Structures are given as C-alpha cells and as structure tokens.
Amino acid sequence: MKDHVFSSVLSLAFVLTFFLCTQPAFSQGNKNLTGTWVTEKPAVYLVEYTEAHPQGAVVANNGIQILERAATLEWILEQRPDGLITGVNNWAAFDESGNKVFEGTEALLGFFDGQAGMLSEPADEANQTAQINFEFKLKGQNKIEGFAYNVGSVKLLAMRFELVRK
C-alpha cells in the first residue's frame, strides 16, 4: 500500500512538473502569420495634403496641411520558417463622409519574430501614394496592433491600425 501511494504521488508530481514546464509552449499557440488579416473597422490615418488627393477632413496644424482619412486593410500573408514574410495588402481609403476615394493592391515584404514584426509596401505610382512601413505586435493568436508611416516620399503619413485573423 505504501509503495502504491508513493508511486501515485510520484506520478502526480511528474504530470504536474510536465504540465508546468510545457505550459508556456502551449499557451503561445500559433505564432505564424500565414493567412488573411483584415481591419474590422476602418483605421483612421493622417496624411499630408496633395493636389492629387485633396479628399479628407482638414486637421489643424501649424505647419503643413494635414488631412484625416480612414482606410480598410486586408493582408494576405505567407510566412516562411525563417520569419520572412511575403504578401499583398488590399486597401481602400475613405473621406470624412465614408465615401471610397481610392483603393489599391500593394506587395508586402517583411519579417516576424514571433512577437513583433515589420512589413513594407512600395509606393504606388498609379495612385501616387507613399511607400509605407507597418510595424506591429501580435496580441494573442488572432489580433495584430500596430502603426504605419511613410518612407521615401515627400507625403507624410501616420496611422494606427488593428487587424484580426479572418
């Protein structure tokens, strides 16, 4: 009887130790971004006024003229085992009345380290839009939060966004 109790306690200790040691691995879940990610509601962004794209609500600023718009994003991503990502961004921009003012599909290229990442899309010559970088963090298995900004362009842009796995 004494040996049976001892082996039961030892077995229980082993199971608890195994569970506690492996819990972080199980709780981290899917850290792969492969799939489709979408905005549930349009993301507000600020962009510098240009004559080519005058749509949007004017935002008070002491320097340059800034417009506020909203955008929807749909990322279709493929993550490689080394963390590098390829994909596309299907996006649409809306004015202050909710009217679609332009849209496009841009290539995405970047990386993800299991917690945070960065994607870059090229400037769209046809729509005369800026090159944009997206920096983000994974929140749980199915939510991305981040910010975007322009690079390599004279048009300033800043956006906060949230995407969910579709």
Image (cartoon, rainbow, N blue to C red):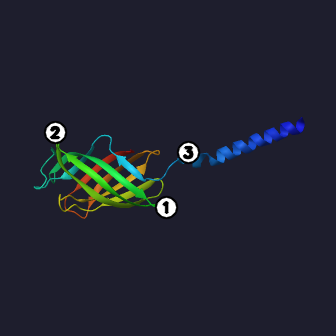
Residue matched to label 1 = 81
Q: Are marks 1 and 3 in contact (CB under 8 Å)?
A: no
Q: Give the image location of residue 115, x and y in percent.
A: 47, 53
Mark 3 closeness class: few <14, some 14–19, many ≥20 residues within 10 Å: few
Residue lying at the far top of the rendered structure: 1
Which labelled disc corresponds to residue 9? none
- Secondary structure category for the residue under label 3: helix
**Label 3 amino acid?**
Ser
Kindly identify which residue carries mark 3. 27
Of tags 1 and 3, the one toward the viewer is 1
Residue marked by disc 2: 97
Query: Farthest residue in the bottom direction?
Result: 152
Which is nearer the N-term, disc 1 or disc 3?
3
Report the number of numbered marks. 3
Is 84 in front, or is 116?
A: 84
Name the quadrant of the N terminus: top right
Q: Residue at x 28, y 52 (%)?
A: 90
Q: Amino acid at mark 1?
A: Pro
Q: Secondary structure at mark 2?
A: loop
Q: Are marks 3 and 2 in contact (CB under 8 Å)?
A: no
88 up-or-down from 144: above or below: below
Q: In 3D space, how far apart are the residues under numbered discs 1 and 3 (Cα atoms)?
A: 20 Å
Label 2 is placed on what type of residue?
A: Ser
Nearest to N terminus: mark 2 or mark 1: 1
